[in-house]
Image (cartoon, rainbow, N blue to C red):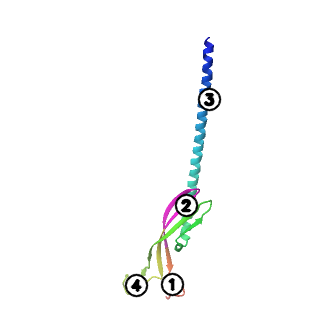
Amino acid sequence: MKENQHNGFIVLEILIAGLILTASIAATMYLFRMGFDHLERANQSNLLSSKLTQATGLIRTLDMQKGSGEEDIGEGVTLKWDAQLLNVSRPIKGWAEFSEFSTPSIHELLLYRVNFNLNYKGIVREYKLNVFRYRPLQTPGEVLF
């Protein structure tokens, strides 16, 4: 008589064990998926960070008078930039700024603020950079020594 009373509990125990096993498998699959997503985002962020030095070098060679533009810097990374002129100056050579012994320079100095962002698969990183340029005011044939 005792044996018949325990037979019903075995089926119930198997059902509970199956539910626990199913829940643990579902949780493990979810954690693997989350880990893969975070690893993919970390790889994308590392790629953007590695392209930052290339982007700053490219910005220093661009024509700032265009004002803005978009460049492809490889591996699916795009660079969007916007330049704004902050200041223009013409240095003076000589002893004093208002002296008769001073002469204006044959170059103009330009300072640009460049706002740019790197974009890769929906991840966008924004940066700012100051770029210093000079522009000759005379051609080499016009310069008198």
Q: Is residue 142 above or below residue 125?
A: below
Q: Earlier in the sequence, mark 4 or mark 3?
A: 3
Q: CA distance from mark 2 to mark 3?
A: 49 Å
Q: Residue at x 50, y 60 (%)?
A: 126
Q: Is residue 6 visible?
A: yes
Disc ID at residue 138: 1
Q: Earlier in the sequence, mark 1 or mark 3?
A: 3
Question: Considering the image in quadrants, where does the N terminus appear?
Answer: top right
Q: Which residue is mark 3?
A: 18
Of circles 4 and 3, the one toward us is: 3
Of circles 4 and 1, the one toward us is: 1
User: Label 3 crowding class (10 Å Cα cut-off): few <14, some 14-19, many 20+?
Assistant: few
Q: Is residue 36 above or below residue 82?
A: above
Question: What residue type is disc 2 on?
Answer: Leu
Do the residues bearing badges 4 and 2 touch, measured as CB atoms within 8 Å?
Answer: no
Of circles 2 and 3, the one toward us is: 3
29 drawn magenta: no
128 drawn magenta: yes
